[in-house]
Image: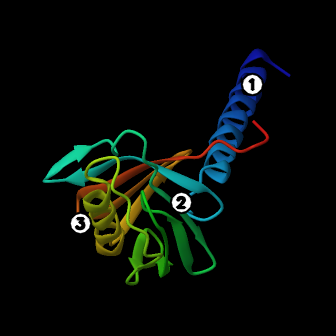
Amino acid sequence: MNEQNWMRIGLLVLAGVGFLAILAVALTATDDIEGETWVAEELVIDGAMTAPISGTELTASFEDGSVNGIAGCNSFFASYEVDGSSVTVGPAGATMAFCATPEGIMEQETTYLTLISTADSFTREGDRLELMEGDNILISYRAAESEQD
């Protein structure tokens, strides 16, 4: 074999390795919202992305058509459907406790549950999930760290 043939073979091998690397990334990337407990890092309150009130946790776990989690004070549950990157969440039911502290927790809870049911799409990149309405982000989540970490 001459030098040109070896160069062609080398380029083909490099191209093949590059393709396999891209394929591996594509196969490990996910657009699924299931299989994680999502912890809200920000949500829209009064038109601005805001961190949850200190001392509160807002979570959501999507599995087999049911979403449940903590809305700050109460546990909640709702049905949902996913079609590609579209999501429809049904009206949420919740336990009925009243939390007086921290200040604003009940208003935040109402807002959170409203935003979840308003979402019409999502994006997921690794351990990040955003619920959206149109082009507007409603809630930005991160995956909860597993107990094995």
The amino acid at mark 2 is: Asp
| Vertical arrangement, residue 144 with respect to residue 64, above or below | above
Mark 2 burial class by Cα count in 10 Å: few <14, some 14-19, many 20+: some
User: In the image as oriented, which residue stretches furthest toward the top?
Assistant: 3
User: In the image as oriented, which residue stretches furthest toward the right?
Assistant: 1
Give the spatial CA distance, label 1 vs label 2: 35 Å
Kindly identify the residue that appears in the image at 33 percent across and 72 percent down: 120
**Tag 2 near tag 3, CB within 8 Å:** no
Position of 10 with respect to 144 (left or right) is right
Give the numbered dot on residue 35. none
* Residue with the mark numbered 3: 134
- Label 1's element? helix
User: In the image as oriented, which residue stretches furthest toward the left?
Assistant: 47
Give the spatial CA distance, label 1 vs label 3: 47 Å
* Residue with the mark numbered 1: 10
- Residue 55 at x, y = what percent? 43, 41
Q: Could you tell which of marks 2 and 3 lies nearer the N-terminus?
A: 2
> Considering the image in quadrants, where does the N terminus appear?
top right
